[in-house]
Image: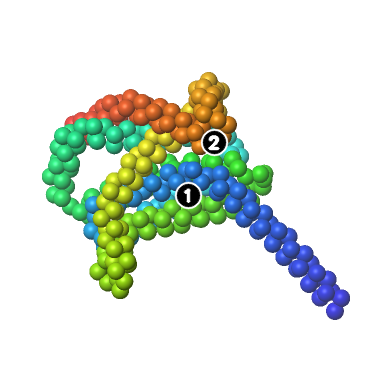
């Protein structure tokens, strides 16, 4: 009997330690997730543009496919990579993040260039439709792949920020906390995206079937307002890519020893106040301008490289 009691005491002690460990992991994950909130906003703003233009019945399946890709990015690729790099090669994290930041700058600048060159954009779109036979399934596949690729960069930033906020050297604790952050953020981002892309359908239902006049008016307002809202969200998403990409580049240079650009930007931002909204806005605008400038520099380089590979592929055939 005394042996059984001793065993129960041991089990209770183990359970207490386990509960404390779970509490610690959740606490660490909450803190890390809060620090990555800015990047979460960027992710939520960027994603809806990939669903724009498809039939209503395809919107949620597309969001679900992107969300699954995001979970795969975070848990299967980035989580092990973050733990390995932080343990064995922490020096490699800044340059890798800077490559991701450069990609975001390129993608954002490409969108801006297409807006500024509408004729070029129209011709390119017509060529795409002609070459693909206006195949909606093929276009959807391209959009999903592009969204998952962009998500990978933003997820890398989120996971890196979260990793830097964790105050533990235990690799299992870090892994569990990062997994919680990754899953929670994915649910938040793509839940919000699903609500955004289906808002017009909800508004149409309210306008058609609402019992009260006020309900129908609200529904009509949602339906009328959603196209403009989605266009605004596309602009916000593009600006977010440029801002995040520029900030990653600037912070990466500081991490690698060149502090002058970051110090100069911080100095300009502090002219508007210490840590206030004005300082944040100035910093975001400067980072975004730098991101756009870098992206525009990368445009001919990337286009030339793609043309070179295309020519090589054609010659190979």
Q: Residue at x 24, y 35 (%)?
A: 114
At 54% from the left and 36% from the top, the residue drawn is: 276
Give 141 or 185, whichever is nearer the viewer. 185
Regarding mark 2 in the picture, which secondary structure is present there?
loop
Q: Residues within 10 Å of mark 2 (few under 14, many from 20)?
A: few
Q: Quadrant of residue 100?
A: top left
Residue 196: image x %, image y %? Answer: 35, 56
Q: Secondary structure at mark 1?
A: helix
Question: Is residue 15 shown to the viewer in this render?
Answer: yes
- Nearer-N-terminus badge (1/2): 1
Residue 237's x, y, as percent?
Answer: 36, 42
CA gap, disc 1 to disc 2? 32 Å
Q: Quadrant of residue 201?
A: bottom left
Quadrant location of residue 215?
Answer: bottom left
Image x and y of residue 55, in percent? 23, 58
Q: How many marks?
A: 2
Q: Which residue is mark 2?
A: 276
Where does label 1 land, which residue? 74
Q: In this rendered view, identify the residue nearer to me: 306 or 121.
A: 121
Residue 118: numbered disc: none
Eye-nearest disc, 1 or 2: 2
Q: Residue at x 46, y 34 (%)?
A: 281
Quadrant in which the C terminus appears: top left
Question: Please, which residue is most extreme toward the right here?
Answer: 2
Number of residues whose C-alpha sits closer than 10 Å to that of mark 1, classed few (under 14), some (14–19) or many (20 or more): many
Residue at x-position 18% and y-position 41%: 125
Residue 66 coordinates in the image, percent (x, y): 37, 53
Left or right relative to 1: residue 246: left
Position of 241 relative to 228 (above/below): above
Residues under numbered marks 1 and 2 in contact, where contact means CB atoms less than 8 Å apart: no
């Amino acid at each position: 009997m005394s042996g059984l009691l001793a065993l129960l005491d041991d089990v209770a002690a183990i359970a207490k330690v386990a509960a404390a460990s779970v509490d610690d992991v959740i606490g660490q994950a909450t803190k890390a997730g809060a620090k990555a909130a800015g990047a979460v906003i960027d992710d939520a703003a960027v994603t809806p543009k990939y669903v724009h233009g498809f039939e209503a019945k395809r919107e949620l399946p597309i969001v679900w496919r992107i969300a699954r890709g995001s979970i795969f990015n975070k848990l299967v690729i980035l989580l092990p990579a973050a733990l390995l790099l932080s343990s064995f090669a922490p020096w490699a994290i800044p340059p890798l993040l800077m490559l991701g930041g450069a990609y975001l700058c390129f993608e954002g600048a490409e969108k801006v260039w297409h807006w500024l060159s509408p004729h070029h954009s129209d011709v390119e779109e017509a060529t795409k439709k002609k070459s693909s036979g206006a195949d909606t399934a093929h276009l959807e596949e391209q959009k999903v792949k592009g969204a998952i690729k962009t998500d990978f960069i933003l997820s890398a930033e989120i996971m890196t920020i979260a990793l830097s906020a964790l105050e533990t050297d235990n690799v299992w604790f870090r892994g569990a906390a990062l997994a919680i952050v990754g899953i929670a953020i994915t649910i938040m981002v793509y839940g919000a995206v699903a609500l955004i892309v289906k808002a017009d359908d909800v508004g149409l239902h309210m306008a058609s079937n609402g019992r009260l006049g006020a309900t129908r008016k609200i529904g009509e307002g949602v339906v009328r307002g959603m196209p403009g809202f989605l266009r605004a969200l596309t602009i916000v998403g593009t600006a977010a890519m440029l801002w995040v990409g520029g900030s990653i580049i600037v912070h990466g240079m500081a991490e690698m020893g060149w502090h002058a650009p970051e110090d100069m930007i911080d100095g300009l931002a502090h002219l508007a106040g210490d840590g206030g909204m004005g300082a944040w806005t100035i910093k975001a605008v400067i980072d975004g301008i730098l991101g756009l400038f870098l992206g525009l520099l990368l445009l001919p380089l990337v286009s030339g490289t793609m043309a070179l590979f295309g020519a090589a592929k054609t010659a190979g055939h």
